[in-house]
Amino acid sequence: RVSLPCTRVLEKGTEIDLAATVEEGGVISFVAWSGGLYGTDNNVRLILTEDLSIDAIFIRRQLESVSGGSKASADNEIGGWHADNLFDDDLSSGYSSGILKADENGVLQTPVNILIDFGKNTQFDSFALYPRTDTLTKDGKTPNFPVAFRIDISEDGKEFVSVREYVVGGNPMGAVQYFTIPEQNTRYVRICV
């Protein structure tokens, strides 16, 4: 048993058990593994075959949806995949940009900005990105999922302050990706991909 964060050096072929545990009845809940391991089971057994960096993601229970009254817009949309779909509480719809070109590291040559207006100041400290599950790429992966993005906030929708940058540890393969952020109370959020 170790406390996180931790670093362990183990040999290839070593079998390990990972357990994400929380205080029973507490306000923190385990959500998923990310990085070199994707899944939502809090107990996992794996055999090491390569170097891995694994994150356990926890959130406060009773997350509230902020969809009521929220609006989104983007500077690049395609077909029926408009940014306002991000807040329609329908997981079968969503947002997707038009065809974008990325460099060899997956970084977009022309960034995409998604602006979210909560309609009023809203307090939050986490968010989730739901990958498309209606189709796969030719190599069987989740299409159009950002590999790197930044979260900016603003009180007036004009002057933004960067809060955190993220680099996603690989294709999510359809799994919901959960992210934490220092607690914020703001009206506007900009996601810069």
Image (tube, rainbow, N blue to C red):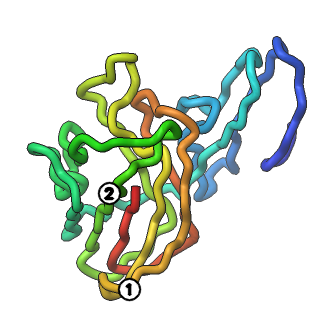
Going by the numbered disc 1, the residue's amino acid type is Glu
Q: Nearer the viewer, residue 58 or 144?
A: 144
In the displayed structure, does residue 18 sit left or right of residue 142? right
Going by the numbered disc 2, the residue's amino acid type is Val
Q: Is there CB contact under 8 Å for labels 2 and 1? A: no
Q: In this view, does 191 lie above or below 186?
A: above
Tell me residue 20's x, y (percent): 69, 39
Q: Is residue 183 above or below residue 65?
A: below
Q: Does dot 1 land on a helix, a strand or a loop?
A: loop
Q: Which residue matches tag 2? A: 112
Identity of the residue drawn at 37% across and 61% down: 64
Q: In which quarter of the image is the N terminus?
A: top right
Binning the other alpha carbons within 10 Å of mark 2 as few (below 14), some (14 to 19) or many (20 upward) gives some
- Extreme-top residue of the structure: 13
Q: Which residue matches tag 1? A: 159
CA–CA distance in space, label 2 to label 1: 18 Å
In the displayed structure, does residue 91 sit left or right of residue 10? left
Identity of the residue drawn at 30% across and 35% down: 132
User: Is residue 62 at least partly visible in the picture?
Assistant: no
Identity of the residue drawn at 20% across and 67% down: 71
Q: Is residue 90 above or below residue 61?
A: above
Q: Nearer the viewer, residue 116 or 161?
A: 161
Quarter of the image for residue 156 reads bottom left
In the displayed structure, does residue 45 sit left or right of residue 29? right
Q: In which quarter of the image is the C terminus?
A: bottom left
Tell me residue 157's x, y (percent): 30, 82
User: Is residue 193 at least partly visible in the picture?
Assistant: yes
Tell me residue 141's x, y (percent): 40, 24
Identity of the residue drawn at 39% across and 17% down: 139
Tell me residue 44's x, y (percent): 67, 24
